[in-house]
Amino acid sequence: MSEQRTAGSLPIENKGSLRGAGLRLPYRLEIDPAGANSPWWVTVVAIVLALIACGIFISLNGMNPFMVYGKMVKGAFGSTFGLTETLVKAIPLLLCGLGVSIAYRISVWNIGAEGQFVAGAMAATAITVYLPHLPVYLTLPAMVVAGIVAGGLWGLLTAIPRNYFGVNELITSLMLNYVALLALNYVVFGPWKDPKGFNFPGSPMFKAAETLPTFGTTRLHVGLIFAIIAVLVYAFVVRYTRWGYELRLIGANSEAAKHAGIRISRHVLVVMVISGGLAGLAGMSEVSGVAHRLMYGISPGYGYTAIIVAWLAKLNPLGLVVASVLFGGLIVGGYSVQTIGLPSSISSMIQGAILFFLIAGGMAGKLRIRSNR
Amino acid sequence: MDALTQIMVSAISSGTPLLLAVLGGILIERSGIMQLGAEGLMLMGAVTSCLVFIHTGNGLLAVLCVLAVSGVLGMLHGFLCVTLHANQVVCGLAMTIFGAGLSAYLGKPVSGQPLVGAVPKLHLAWLEPVPVIGNIFAHMDLFTWLSFVLVVAMHLFIHRTSWGLHLRAVGDNPATADVMGIPVVAIRYGCIIIGSMLIGIGGADLLLVYTPTWNEGMTSGRGWIAVALIIFARWNPIRALACAYFFGVLDSLGFRVQLIGSHIPSYFLKMIPYIVTILVLMFLGWRNKNKPSGAPEALGVPYIREQRF
């Protein structure tokens, strides 16, 4: 790149007389803008390095990291129960991660999946609380629609300030997470609290018609099918439809897309509603399929983990499936080490470390080391 | 103490952690680097001070450890954003997620333990007889005094010294600054490290002074409110003081309204700071539609010498 210097830029290279131009090294780092996407092994290396880094913290805690990791893998993937639990956790991660991915496709940073998840869970529960006498065949569809609509509206609340007031969607979506969590706490400790629940902060248990069917005797529920359908639709729409083409165009170069006559602000609105709706569907399937009631702490941070899932998958549909199963396993593994006295937050520590190393690895793949001579 | 004094006192005590974090954020963003990891840094600062204070009982040592830990995390952020030119938004998110996870992991054993007396109060007896301000300023802790000093010092540094001029040049136009011989990379690293330390101290203040018990996720979004306050304050330390205390009042409002026997559930009162943050940002966006926001011009754009995009 250094050869293509434009007329306006000054040749500052190798001018020792320029005061304080920085440390002189025999080489320099450059970003190759056309650098290929980092190869798959960079992701693997990043995960391994993250595990090593967290292993250091685990050994500081007086535990053998190999034993801890072994226990986590065994807990998450070592038995039929562990495996189905991992898939149960992968469902909300896949749905939320899909929502985050769609938004990120056009560079909208939706980190409000957590709040949209909670909004969906609350709306689905509202159907059971306020419309208990719906016909049996209408109950579940009504809950699904309520969950999607509520999540979508929560997403819209982020899109409107961004579009019309220029407010950074990162801050809005995050503030709305806290609002949604406080609203959740209000209803489970207040008006929706189960009077027969021994003071447990949760709504009454759902009736059979209000719970999603499960596969056989496992806890794996029909939400899995929602998630798979959503991924297939996403893959198809992004690749083969005009709307998906426009999304890819905005993602590649929003200036060019604007000049091509694509109305970006309308896409932002639609994408945020879809993104929130998917997270809302995740919330609905979690209350109706797993918890069978709305309760305090319904999400162990699915919305935040979904950001890492989307980043790890590089917005690729198949990658999303793999990443959400992996992170579902991480959450289940985190629970399984509680038996040896470690906190389950070990999984969120590993998640954060993986994201750090992914960023570093992703950029390292684009950097070129050039000699200064 | 009359009502006004009480409101002032609670505004200052709940605004100080925010103020420290905002000042750190302003220093970092003035150098052109986005800092969205404040939440994670505050949590790490809080958990570090809690662990060190519980194990040693030494408040000074706790603060020194917070400086070390948040400085190292700042170096990590600098390495990713300045040296590797990574996406600064994702780096900030990574810092928040990693900080939240690691602090929850490290803090689990001490969760719920009360801490007292880590930060001494300066009892200024000679101030007490002064009307109005006497009651407010005579019993403040060291961190609050530190935050006052920092506001003035940072204002003078940024706007009145040649180093501050260099800093602003780096934040507005790193390429020109580089040509002028200003060490862009060194200044950015310096700002990120010192700013991260300030944010970490904000977390320590939250834990050691404001709510002296560690709980997972105890900052409850204050780091993000600090990020928003940087925008309200238009990257200016003096305005940051006013903004932080305004949010301090909102923060303590829930407690205050309950005290006078209101029947509004506390959950709704606790929502106020978050909703007000969004509304104020919307108001600012509407009012400043075609005006400069005061943001450093190169904020969030990685600087790569000799390269154009």
Image: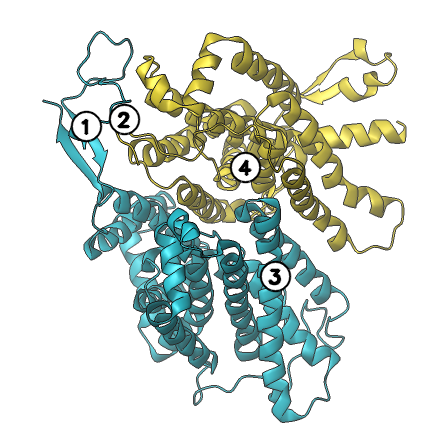
Chain colours: A cyan, B yellow
The residue sitting at the left extreme is A373
Q: On residue B305, which mark appears?
A: 2
Q: Nearer the viewer, mark 1 or mark 2?
A: 2
User: Is residue A13 left or right of B155 when viewed as pictured?
Assistant: left
Question: Where is residue A78 shown, x and y percent of the image?
Answer: 31, 73
Q: Are marks 1 and 2 in contact (CB under 8 Å)?
A: yes
Q: Amino acid at mark 3?
A: Trp
Q: Amino acid at mark 2?
A: Arg
Q: What residue did someone put label 4 on?
A: B46
The residues tagged by marks 4 and 1 sit, at their Cα atoms, a distance apart of 38 Å
Q: On residue A28, which mark appears?
A: 1
Q: Which mark is first along the chain, 4 or 2?
A: 4
Could you tell me which secondary element the residue under label 2 belongs to? loop
Residue closest to the eye, B191 or A331: B191
Q: What is the chain identity of the residue bearing mark 3?
A: A
Q: Are marks 3 and 4 on the same chain?
A: no
Q: Are marks 2 and 3 in contact (CB under 8 Å)?
A: no
